Image: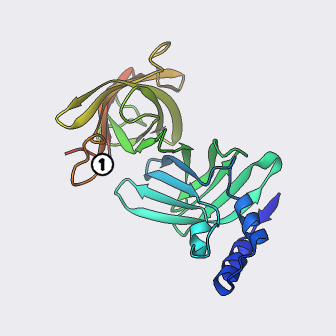
Amino acid sequence: MKPFTYLVILLSFLSSSCHPEIDTDLIQDAKSHYIFNDKASVAYKGIFTTNGSEYRAVLDIIIPTPYSSPVQTNDLLIPRAMVTLMNNDVITIYATNISEEPEGTRAYSFTSDRMNFTLRTNAAGDIGEVLDANYQNISGTAIVAVHTMEAPVVAITGTYSCTTCNGHPNVTNGSTQTFNMMFSSNQGVGSITTQSVLGSTTYYGIGYQNACTLISGYNTCAIESGDGATTNVGHYAAGNPVTWTGTHESNFITVSIDGVCNEVYGTWQWPSNSYGLLSGTFQSDSTCP
């Protein structure tokens, strides 16, 4: 494993600031750490939750454009993450270390006084995995996908609660737990990745979006657990299937003066082992007016 320090970038920046001639060797060396298959930069978007549903967030991670001009500042070269919590509080975290691993894999360590995690990418940069995530020293999990103009990822945080609870110790009346969603398409048919917490266990599941219509300036789509073809199961909890149906609303097509909005809501059910059929509702943290 070869740690990459920011000294090379800083020296390159200082050299270009003080002298008309830019050290092209240093610039090229800095570029080599950031270009994935000749792409200038890579963005990842995803969802995060602590293991007990205390906190949840949307992650926006940028592996920045390579150093190419003396007018760029050093911090523009440092990978950074914007973490938007469920209450819209935004934290910016910079990578404090980059390590190159076998076969071109890279590990970016993001560290702050509130949140820490590691992003590991493959050589092409088209696959990212988040490891060792925690917020306020509470362990959590996260999942991300490459986010581009051609294939934008929509990440939404939210919660679920029960209306038929049957005395289950981990699904109690009046309590809420994490139910986040990540969409591969905002305005049309596409897949959904879900992230939900039951007690202290995080589950990842699948869903799909279809039947989108434009109503009063809002794009309204039906969403449902499963893959839309072979199964309607979102995921299995304690060996039993969790299913859900709902609605995804957004104003990506006609952006309001308040900006883009996304809202998901719906119902779920789960036949538990010892407490019968449980059911309830889910609702995103964000809403559309």
- Which percent across, then down, holds residue 63? 60, 57
The kind of residue tagged 1 is Val
- Which percent across, then down, holds residue 121? 68, 48
Count every numbered label the image shows and give the total.
1
Q: Nearer the viewer, residue 204 or 126?
A: 126
Return the residue at label 1.
260
Q: Residue furthest bottom?
A: 18
Secondary structure beneath dot 1 equals loop
Q: Quadrant of the N terminus?
A: bottom right
- In percent of the image, x 38 and y 62: which residue is there? 89
Q: Residue furthest left?
A: 216
Above or below for 251 versus 267: below
Residue 164 in view (yes/no): no
- In percent of the image, x 51 and y 62: which residue is there? 136
- In percent of the image, x 48 and y 20: which residue is there? 227
Answer few, some or many: residues within 10 Å of disc 1's Cα (few below 14, many 20 plus, some between 14 and 19).
Answer: few
- Which percent across, then down, holds residue 213? 26, 26
Q: Nearer the viewer, residue 195 or 269?
A: 195
- Which percent across, then down, holds residue 217? 20, 38
Q: Nearer the viewer, residue 65 or 136?
A: 65
Q: Residue furthest front?
A: 20
Q: Quadrant of the C terminus?
A: top left
